[in-house]
Image (cartoon, grey):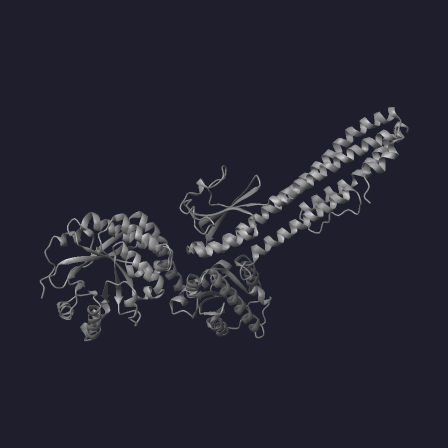
Amino acid sequence: MKHSIATRYGILLAAMTALVGCCVLLVNIFYLERYAHAAIEEGQHHLTDAVEKQLIRDAQLVAESLANNLDTAVYGSDFSSIQEQLEALSRNTNVAYTYIYNTSGTVIHDGSAELHNYGRHISELLPPGLPVTLEPDTRKIGQYIHIAQPIHSGETTFAVLRIAITYTEAEEDIREMSADLALQGKELRNSIVITSLSIIILLLAAAMALVFFLSQHLLAPIRQLVDHCRRYAAGESQIHFKLERNDEFGLLGDALEEMKDSINRSRSQVERLAYHDALTQLPNRRMFNEELNKMLSWADRHNNQVAVLFIDLDHFKQVNDVAGHEVGDKLLIQAGNRLTNLLVTEAENIDFPVPESLLLARLGGDEFVMMLPNCKDRQQISRIATRIADVLDHSFTIEDRRYTVSASVGITLFPEHGRSVTELLKQADIAMYAAKHSGRKRHRFFEPQMNNEVISKMLIQQGVRDAMHKGELKLAYQPIVDMENGDIVGAEALIRWEHPERGPIAPDTFIPLIEKTDQIMPLTLWTLEHACLDLIQQIMPRRDRFKLSVNISGAVLREPAIQDAIHNIIQRHRLPKHTLHLELTETSMMENIQSCADTLRDWKKVGADIWIDDFGTGYSSLSYLHSLPIDGLKIDRSFIAEMNRGQGDQVIETIITLANSMGLKTVSEGIETESQQHFVHSRGGHYAQGYLYAKPAPLKQLLKLLDKETLYEPL
């Protein structure tokens, strides 16, 4: 049974005389009030300060870890990977908001799948008093901890992660414990008053001595709890708040112990999130960097070498796009398990100085990284890289369906290629891209010249966004002529990039690179928008039946929003039917023929014609011509060029015959000589395009050509 302090000591003080007791009471209350109040306030202050500092450290740890994990995804504008990691954060903490903005303060992700705030300035979204900064910044306002964490690429900050985390449960515990502490202090003071009144029969000196002794005895639990709070705030984790008592102080100690356990559990969850990948449970980038740094120090001391292998899954995005992210996640888990088992097997042949569980990490998306210490030579490392490609090349069975991916592996060596974690990872990433471009399911060791190639490609991928806004992109038009009468019946819109420093950048150089980023859709829509404006405002006043051809990249057909985006552009400009020709390649159409057919039919409803570009170079099956709403075929220039070497004639004849039998028109690309023109025309070709008639040129030159009756005299 729990007994009240007032009950135990009230009887003892009842014998005090009234006069002496009053004097003792007044003196005791004055000094006890000051001491108890100061002790309670100090305990509350230390407890609150300790918890708040710990919460802020935990929040900073989460933000820093997340920013490190996001650098590759944000750098490559991989929105699906960004969304995945932000969702993992929201499942483990109470997040008020998450924003990622670039160095201009423009929001590029807000943590939502719909990207409601994309493109807004971050200052419009932050609470008052928070600065727009590119430097680390942590502020606690009310119940929220607001953190700004830069996202780096090497030494350069190119984006900032800003999050707000609330730990209302911990703060509520602090308030409750503080209230309990204050209540117990109040009860203590009341008990002293009763005790003092009870000892009025004793002499003044004896009464004062007795009251002082009792006061010190009763305040001992508070002093003990205050001392424990101070030590816990200093980082002593083995502190226990339990008091072996059956009174109110015992209850308070039990409550503080429960709160400490709750905070420790929260800290453990935060540390798990900060150092492990939420999906595969492998070490994440932060933990791998720390372990790799330790391993480099070990290798330096023992004159040893460490290999860093950067592993990227080929064609993984197709699995995500076709089967969904849930299947993609399961594939990543299986891939991580296969790589882990491979390391366990290799441990039988290589004496790893650390457990195998520390040698493999998932950086994010479909990227894994592995370190191999204590390897003998490049041959042994190459053998392991080959095994990695082999184990990931076997199909993955998920929900009774099989999915196939491969792996490209980039390898860098310590100390041959670098001596820091950042340098080794960067160079391994560069080597991985070189392996991917050399044919996939390959591995490559880093070579110095790879760095210049990657930097050049990166500048192109990053620069196209600014090029659209700065007017560096222009449209050139190459006429398409009627082979019967030589009239210009249309033109193909071709994009050109005039870089202010590098000069003209050929489309064959930058478009394949842009197709691998999320900038291909804005670039495609920019081209279509400007081509439609030129058609309506400049060309059609001269030729009202002019046909304008615009290439639609196959990469954008996988974007769900492309159908409506192009539909809206055509409707907004009110283009007459059959004046806009949208050109797509065979390969891009065949990747998902049913959804592609629905998209093409929608574009035809608003007046566009659909042409197959580079016909004959893609799929050999022609059955799709019956299922897709096709209006014409463009014969690839490679077949025209083969005519000069006495080849390609039969292919051209076959394509023209096939088109005529199906009621389709043809455009022969790459006509450069009169003999080529004569051959195509004699075989029934309808339209032609090439240097024989005109090279691609700015709009004003096309308009001059339109003033002519014909470009050549028909045969």
The answer, for residue 609, to whether it is visible in the render is yes
Q: Position of residue 252 (x, y in %)?
A: 74, 43
Residue 494 lies, in percent from the top left, at 25, 57
Residue 467 location (% of width, % of height): 32, 51
Residue name at image x 57 percent, y 55 percent: 273
Residue 430 horizontal side relative to residue 705, left or right: right
Q: Residue furthest top?
A: 19
In the rendered image, the quadrant that contains the N terminus is top right
Q: Quadrant of the C terminus?
A: bottom left
Q: Is residue 504 visible?
A: no
> Would you say 399 lies left or right of 622 here?
right
Q: Is residue 431 above or below residue 3?
A: below
Image coords of residue 398 (percent x, y): 49, 67
Vertical position of residue 180 compared to residue 479: above or below? above
Figure quadrant of residue 209: top right
Q: 41 and 557: which one is in front? A: 557
